[in-house]
């Protein structure tokens, strides 16, 4: 039985990662330009991608304390992922991140994906605050986060841009 999609937008399907995604996941994570602001090393091995997709099978969307990589699919192809983690100590707070294959960038897909995921977290999962951590050198990601309504609090350290969106 296929897992249910988290969201379907005009151009995207946001769904659980599947074992068949490992090669595409490894390919875009192996691109040094995509990895330079991320926490993983390149090349990103297919075995590592297979282990990650297997790990994701046991994680629910918005499950406190666990990261979930949400597959971003366009025209039947994995083009990236949105990472979601709900705080294990305060399940009203979440963090999001994103990675998009180089050939899928600049077309609004990451914005469209975040505009689907963020409202799900607020409305269906009761989040009060959503953050994203972004390297200050990554101007395109900072601009994307601002487009989806996030802003940098005054307390953010200068070398890392912590952007947040709140519901009061």
Image: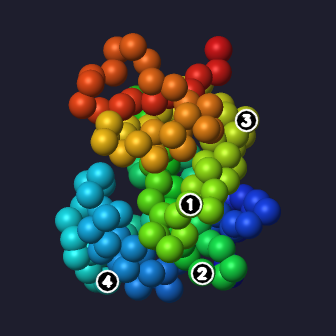
Rendering coords of residue 25 (x, y %)? 42, 75
Q: Which residue is mark 2?
A: 77
From the viewer's perspective, tell me whether residue 42 is left or right of residue 119: left
Q: Nearer the viewer, residue 28 or 15?
A: 28
Of the numbered discs 1 and 2, the one sitting upstream in the chain is 2
Mark 2 touches mark 4? (CB < 8 Å) = no
From the viewer's perspective, tell me whether residue 69 is left or right of residue 61: left
Q: Secondary structure at mark 3?
A: helix
Residue 101 appears anywhere in the view:
yes
Q: Residue at x 67, y 53 (%)?
A: 112
Of the numbered discs 1 and 3, the one sitting upstream in the chain is 1
CA gap between label 2 and label 3 equals 28 Å
Of the numbered discs 2 and 3, the one sitting upstream in the chain is 2
Crowding at dot 2, Cα within 10 Å, few <14 / some 14-19 / many 20+, comes out as few
Q: Residue 106's mark?
A: 1
The quadrant of the image that shows the C terminus is top right
Q: Secondary structure at mark 1?
A: loop
Mark 2 or mark 3: which is in front? 2
Q: Nearer the viewer, residue 55 or 5?
A: 5
Q: Residue 46's mark?
A: 4
Q: Residue at x 69, y 66 (%)?
A: 12
Crowding at dot 3, Cα within 10 Å, few <14 / some 14-19 / many 20+, comes out as few
Q: Residue 123's mark?
A: 3
CA gap between label 2 and label 4 equals 17 Å
Of the numbered discs 2 and 4, the one sitting upstream in the chain is 4
Rendering coords of residue 114 (x, y %)? 61, 48
């Amino acid at each position: 039985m296929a897992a249910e999609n988290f969201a379907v937008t005009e151009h995207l399907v946001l769904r659980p990662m599947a074992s068949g995604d490992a090669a595409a996941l490894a390919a875009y994570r192996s691109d040094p330009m995509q990895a330079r602001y991320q926490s993983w090393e390149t090349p990103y091995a297919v075995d590592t991608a297979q282990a990650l997709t297997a790990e994701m099978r046991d994680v629910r969307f918005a499950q406190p304390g666990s990261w979930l990589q949400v597959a971003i699919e366009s025209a039947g192809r994995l083009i990236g992922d949105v990472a979601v983690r709900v705080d294990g100590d305060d399940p009203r707070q979440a963090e999001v991140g994103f990675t998009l294959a180089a050939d899928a960038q600049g077309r609004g897909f990451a914005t469209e994906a975040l505009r689907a995921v963020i409202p799900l977290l607020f409305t269906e999962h009761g989040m009060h605050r959503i953050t994203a951590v972004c390297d200050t050198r990554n101007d395109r990601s900072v601009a994307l986060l601002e487009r989806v309504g996030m802003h940098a609090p005054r307390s953010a350290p200068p070398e890392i841009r912590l952007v947040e969106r709140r519901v009061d």
